[in-house]
């Protein structure tokens, strides 16, 4: 039972990571004993689908099987819908490469017992104990994202706080108040968007530092045979594109123009998260850069053009 007296669920979106779920989700469930476990299996191969079916059957998990890849946000929406239908009132969203102990989950549950409109995240560390996440901000100046630890380097800068979708705790009440994840992002930035909509719905976002999750991001790269630092072309493209999508959702015209002007600098920063050596080994980062910049500019221009059209129509009216 959850801290508010209702059932609680773990929701995981899978994409070719059944081996990670067999380790991480199984360990979390064994220790924390949630009432409901939902895995959304975005399709990759028929063999992976069969492995996921077998694992879910053995573990007693509810498996949701979309016919097409719904992306992360779409997968979360499907998983939460299944959990709510099963009676969940509290929900833990967890990455396939993350684990949590029962005590840490209890801390999150208690944080919303009397505050149902609080979106919570634990402090997230690597297997070696290094801090991977302890709160993040998005700059309203240029759309860069950075950790709370860097706030002192940017005194007075306007920011919005956001929590990573790698591990979130929220109530059914908060989910209904926000309407869930925005599926237009497909991958990346949907957690930034969700955090912002929590605030606009009258809620707050909070890092619960006494709660800890372990995130083995390198396990995802190893399972897909990527160098540890390199990111996928998908990662680069959607991080570049979705920064501008977020801007058009929440910023005024001046803010959109400002973020559009900095799109190439922001895109370079995203690409270099994977290091410089990758630029000599693969064309993928270059493709992601040019596609992402192109589509980010298009998204901004469509929004700005629509706003200009509305102004002209109002003037004529």
Image: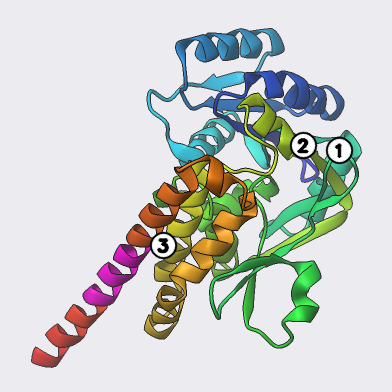
Please name whichever residue, 55 or 7, is drawn nearer the observer in this view of the structure.
Answer: 55
Give the side of residue 5 with respect to residue 314, left or right: right
- Could you tell me which quadrant the C terminus lies in? bottom left
**Residue 253 vertical placement versus 247 (above, below):** below
Circles 3 and 2: CB distance less than 8 Å?
Answer: no
- Of marks 1 and 3, which one's residue comes earlier in the chain? 1
Residue stretch rendered in magenta on the structure? 296-306
Q: Give me the disc on residue 216.
A: 2
Q: Nearer the viewer, mark 3 or mark 2?
A: 2
Task: Find disc 1 in the rendering and name its residue.
Answer: 127
Q: Mark 2 falls on what kind of element?
A: loop
Give the side of residue 15 with respect to residue 90, left or right: left
- Of marks 1 and 2, which one's residue comes earlier in the chain? 1
**At 53% from the left edge and 30% from the top edge, which residue is drawn?**
82
Based on the picture, tell me whether residue 304 belongs to the magenta stretch.
yes
How many neighbours does mark 2 have within 10 angstroms: few (below 14), some (14-19), or many (20 or more)?
Answer: many
Name, please, the residue furthest toward the left. Answer: 316
Q: Distance between the residues labelled 1 and 2?
A: 6 Å
Circles 1 and 2: CB distance less than 8 Å?
Answer: yes
How many neighbours does mark 1 have within 10 angstroms: few (below 14), some (14-19), or many (20 or more)?
Answer: some
Q: Mark 3 falls on what kind of element?
A: helix
**Horizontal and vertical percent for residue 314?**
16, 87
**At 87% from the left edge and 35% from the top edge, which residue is drawn?**
101
Q: Main secondary structure of the magenta part?
A: helix
Q: Distance between the residues labelled 3 and 2?
A: 29 Å
- Could you tell me which quadrant the N terminus lies in? top right
Based on the picture, tell me whether residue 303 belongs to the magenta stretch.
yes
**At 76% from the left edge and 80% from the top edge, which residue is drawn?**
153
Please name whichever residue, 116 or 259, is drawn nearer the observer in this view of the structure.
Answer: 259
**Residue 276 vertical placement versus 49 (above, below):** below
Task: Find disc 3 in the rendering and name its residue.
Answer: 245
**Horizontal and vertical percent for residue 206?**
75, 62
């Amino acid at each position: 039972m959850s801290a508010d007296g209702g059932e609680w669920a773990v929701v995981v979106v899978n994409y070719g990571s059944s081996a990670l779920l067999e380790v991480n989700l199984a360990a979390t469930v064994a220790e924390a004993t949630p009432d409901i476990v939902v895995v959304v299996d975005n399709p990759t191969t028929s063999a992976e689908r069969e492995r996921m079916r077998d694992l879910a059957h053995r573990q007693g998990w509810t498996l949701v099987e979309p016919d097409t890849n719904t992306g992360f946000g779409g997968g979360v929406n499907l998983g939460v819908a299944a959990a709510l239908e099963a009676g969940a009132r509290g929900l833990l969203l967890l990455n396939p490469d993350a684990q949590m102990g029962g005590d840490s989950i209890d801390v999150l549950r208690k944080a919303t017992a009397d505050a149902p409109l609080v979106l919570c995240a634990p402090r997230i560390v690597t297997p070696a104990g290094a801090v991977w996440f302890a709160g993040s901000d998005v700059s309203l100046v240029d759309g860069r994202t950075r950790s709370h630890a860097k706030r002192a380097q940017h005194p007075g800068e306007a920011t919005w706080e956001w929590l990573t979708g790698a591990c979130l705790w929220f109530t059914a009440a908060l989910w209904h108040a926000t309407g869930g994840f925005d599926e237009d992002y497909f991958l990346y930035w949907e957690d930034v968007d969700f955090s912002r909509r929590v605030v606009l719905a009258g809620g707050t976002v909070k890092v619960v530092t006494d709660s800890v999750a372990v995130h083995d991001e390198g396990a995802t790269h190893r399972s897909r045979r990527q160098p540890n630092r390199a990111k996928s072309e998908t990662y680069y493209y959607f991080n570049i594109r979705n920064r501008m999508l977020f801007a058009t959702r929440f910023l005024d015209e001046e803010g959109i123009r400002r973020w559009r002007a900095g799109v190439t600098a922001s895109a370079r920063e995203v690409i270099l998260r994977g290091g410089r050596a990758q630029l000599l080994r693969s064309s993928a980062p270059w493709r992601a850069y040019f596609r992402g910049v192109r589509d980010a500019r298009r998204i901004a221009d469509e929004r700005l053009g629509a706003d200009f059209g509305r102004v002209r129509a109002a003037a004529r009216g």
